[in-house]
Image (cartoon, rainbow, N blue to C red):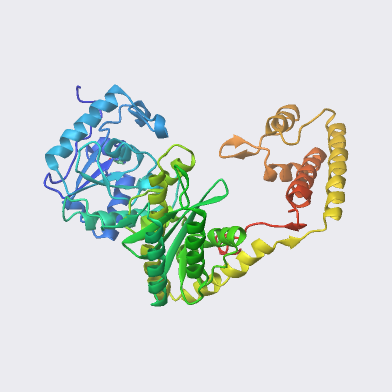
Amino acid sequence: MPKAHSFVPPSGPTDASIVFVGEQPGRTEVQRRKPFCGPSGQLLGDLMGSAGILRTECYFTNVIKDFDAPIKHYVNIKGHNTSVSPAGQTYFDQLKAELERIRPNVVVAVGNVALFALTSRTGVTKWRGSVLESTLVRGLKVIPTIHPTTILPPKMVYTNRYLIINDLALALKQSTSPEIQMSPRTYIISPTFLESLDYLDRCIEHGLADDVVAFDIEIHNMQLSCISFSFKADEAISIPFVGSGGDYFSPDQEIEVMQKIAELLEDPRIRKLGQNVIFDSSFLLRRYGIKVHSLDDTMIAQQIIAADFPKGLDFITSMWTDMPYYKDEGKQWFKGLGGRWETLWEYNARDSIACSIAFPKQMTELTSKGNLGTYERQRQLIEPLTFMMEHGIRADVKAMTTAFMNADADIARLQEELNETAGMSINPNSPKQLQEYFYNLKRISPYKKGGRPTTNDDALKRLARRGFREASIIQDIRRVNKQRANYLDPSHVDPDGRIRCSYNPVGTRYSRI
Ligand code: URA
């Protein structure tokens, strides 16, 4: 391929142990014929400094090395349907030869295009912080990170700073050797009846000796599919109840295993740990009458440590463990794509191990920041909230039914009023019709969100303030509709006359339930 007009060659020492692979040069890079020297490159330099990496010791390159055409012309990232043009493929081949020549200890894939070129994966927010093997150059270690351009305008996701620094610090740690060093871990799956009982006994023994026992359940078709336990960072068991041949244990064996599980989970002297553990504890209470006591939760800890960041186990795993992202395996299994039961069991065991590894580190962090008390208070909500979920709230079903029907009548009356005021029939739930009515027919200059016309709540509020009666009627209809569907619908009441819902002890950014 002839050199493109705006070709930007790589730069940096060819014996570097860390190589940065970006997406495509920008304007500044083309002017100076040097990668990563524009605004996002300078920012990357600052973040490298924070992570302790010397810029002069690293080699910089891009997947696409020119700016003759936008990135989509070469690589069009669309999840499973990502496509690479012939020009893009030529650059991929060039990158492969370049990396084979340099053979660094670690490659940092900066952004989605580099992630795809190096590992055939997409979704950099999921994969960032994982140590992966390259599919482009076998044996080459890749650590993906978010592109620093996301921190700059127009996106301005300031919090990405901390994630990138975290990933770069990992890259530095991994740069001392080319091996993909992963802590060895044992996932015990398909245990026999006796092995299951024996492992549960060991959990009890360790729990009574003050080790925290992590656990996690998987539910399929509202049945307990398997449950995992881990009392140390390098081992977990997944005990299944269903497998390819139907029930995994005989009925008598299953009773014995469940009794042992109850013995462990109900013992207030043993600290149990889970991610969003209220989900597990409420299911176990509802289906088996098991009252799980003495609970810790990595999700609660994470929310208190970093309220501005996600609190899912995938994120926790990326921040506190060296386990690569694995959550898609479980998601695929549940979608019926994964197939093998072993995949589910190993996934189940991984969840407990991830908690076992992360939790002591979270505790150290909470202690060092003086936030352990906050964590303790929030964690004490788990048991009462589990009880509240199970107990529910008694409902006056008769009054609800009347109010539900009255709401129907209110909506019909408001709809009539709306049609009369507008002089035509309007569907208040159709953004298309509302936009047509206000912005075309009534010639109001459109309110916008993300650059597009909108008739969302804010827009309607403004229209109502400007005296458009139709807008306030539409708001009224939406309000009554919401009340009716969310709070008055008698079909939400359980057969025993009580309403049940779920609670999240850290449901909001500032930890309100
Ligand atoms: N962004 C990239 O991906 N590469 C560069 O070289 C500069 C900005």
Say left or right for 507 vs 274.
right
Q: Quadrant of the C terminus?
A: bottom right
Q: Quadrant of the N terminus?
A: top left
Q: Residue at x 48, y 64 (%)?
A: 261
Figure quadrant of residue 289:
bottom right
Query: Is residue 297 in view?
Result: no
Image position of 286 with respect to 413: above or below: below
Residue 254: x and y in percent read: 49, 57
Say left or right for 281 vs 236.
right
Image position of 207 with respect to 138: above or below: below
Query: Is residue 445 in view?
Result: yes
Q: Residue at x 16, y 33 (%)?
A: 97
Figure quadrant of residue 328:
top left
Q: Nearer the viewer, residue 256 or 183?
A: 256
Residue 3: x and y in percent read: 20, 25
Residue 314: x and y in percent read: 42, 53
Say left or right for 464 vs 56.
right
Q: In the image, ligand 1 is in what quadrant?
A: top left
Q: Nearer the viewer, residue 264 or 304?
A: 264
Q: Residue at x 46, y 72 (%)?
A: 271
Residue 384: x and y in percent read: 62, 69
